Amino acid sequence: MEQKEDCNDWEQPLLKKETDVAAEMAGQQLALKPIKPVGLSWRGVSLSIPLKGKKNKGKTKEILHQVSGTAPAGRVTAIMGPTGSGKSSLLNALAGRVSFIKGATLEGELSVNGMPVEYGVVRRLCAYVVQDDVLYSFLTVQETLTLATHFYLPSALSEQEKATYVRDVINALGLAKARNTIIGDGQVRGVSGGERKRVSVGVELISNPSLLFLDEPTSGLDSFQAQSVMSAMGSLAQSGRTVVAAIHQPRSSIFDLLDMLVLVSEGRIIYAGSRRGLILRLPGMVLPPSVLPQ
Ligand SMILES: Nc1ncnc2c1ncn2[C@@H]1O[C@H](COP(=O)(O)OP(=O)(O)OP(=O)(O)O)[C@@H](O)[C@H]1O
């Protein structure tokens, strides 16, 4: 796990959550400070990757072509499209993670709250939940999140303060009932698939990021578990966070939970805007198969 910079140094107004107010009124100090909103927008994002093999020397493959869109603060934005359309690539590009790909060329403008920024800035502002999480099967939910506090929080914080972070994350993700359940694996039964995914989100939430990227957060989950994960993402967005998820063909119940959509096909943008806006425009649109929900 990598150490994150403090995401709370943006000169933006603070959002105060209703839950914060309720907790303070109950005399209970919340460890997770109210986050500062981060609205992300991008224009003309193009990504090319060098082809492998001797005969392809010098040749590149364009994976994204002039893709534009926005992910407002306090909203769940879904990047949707058929398999191989470039969803993960766009997510990685926005999260400043394509520098991991040798020889990749990334073009286009990125802004945070209307101010142009380098891709690396977003990387420091965000948390990224990968598709295949790596959690220790023998730890409980609480132990897993406590371990994360040692990676993500300043060592100067007391154990008591770290414990309050863990408590807040558990509550924010509706994991209270599973607090003392082990993660488990194929051999030993542990938390459910949806709880496991929410624990993965929780590990990233310990650093209290304003911006959360998720790669296929519902893949492999049944509809109930998928719904539990996306409802939790909706709650995180309601607390002012910007949630951006790559989702391959969501079920209609999940689709209804999304605020903003970025539809891509073969690396090109088909639609970027609100879910409601797409529904209104649908009759006149020609969409490739498997772009829309099941
Ligand atoms: N590092 C890479 N090197 C070469 N090609 C790549 C690389 N990363 C992605 N691609 C190619 O770019 C295209 C888009 O891939 P990407 O993983 O972004 O699609 P996706 O929409 O997320 O697909 P899926 O839903 O199957 O995960 C695919 O054709 C893929 O093979």
Image (spheres, helix red, strand yellow):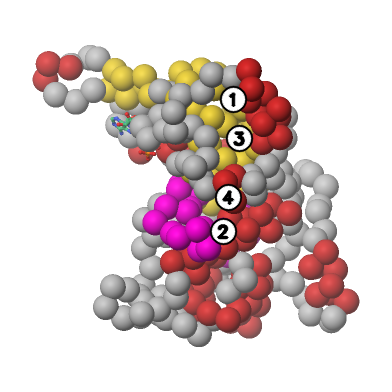
Q: Nearer the viewer, mark 3 or mark 4?
A: 4
| Mark toward the start of the polypeptide (2 vs 4) | 2
Q: Which of marks 3 and 2 is in front?
A: 2
Magenta span: 204-227
Residue that numbered label 3 is attached to:
261
* 94 left or right, relative to 274: left
Q: Please, what is the three-letter code of the amino acid marked with disc 3? A: Leu
Residue that numbered label 4 is attached to:
254
Residue that numbered label 1 is attached to:
271
Residue 120 shown in magenta: no
| Mark toward the start of the polypeptide (2 vs 1) | 2
| Spatial separation of the CA atoms under disc 3 and disc 4 | 12 Å
Q: Residue 227 carries which label?
A: 2
| Spatial separation of the CA atoms under disc 3 and disc 2 | 17 Å
| Spatial separation of the CA atoms under disc 2 and disc 4 | 6 Å
Of all residues shown, which one is farthest toward the left?
54
Q: Pinpoint residue 213: horizontal percent, then vertical percent.
A: 53, 47
Q: Please, what is the three-letter code of the amino acid marked with disc 4? A: Ile
Secondary structure type for disc 2: helix
Secondary structure type for disc 1: strand
Question: Are dots 3 and 1 in contact, CB under 8 Å?
Answer: yes
Up/down of 233 relative to 47, above or below? below
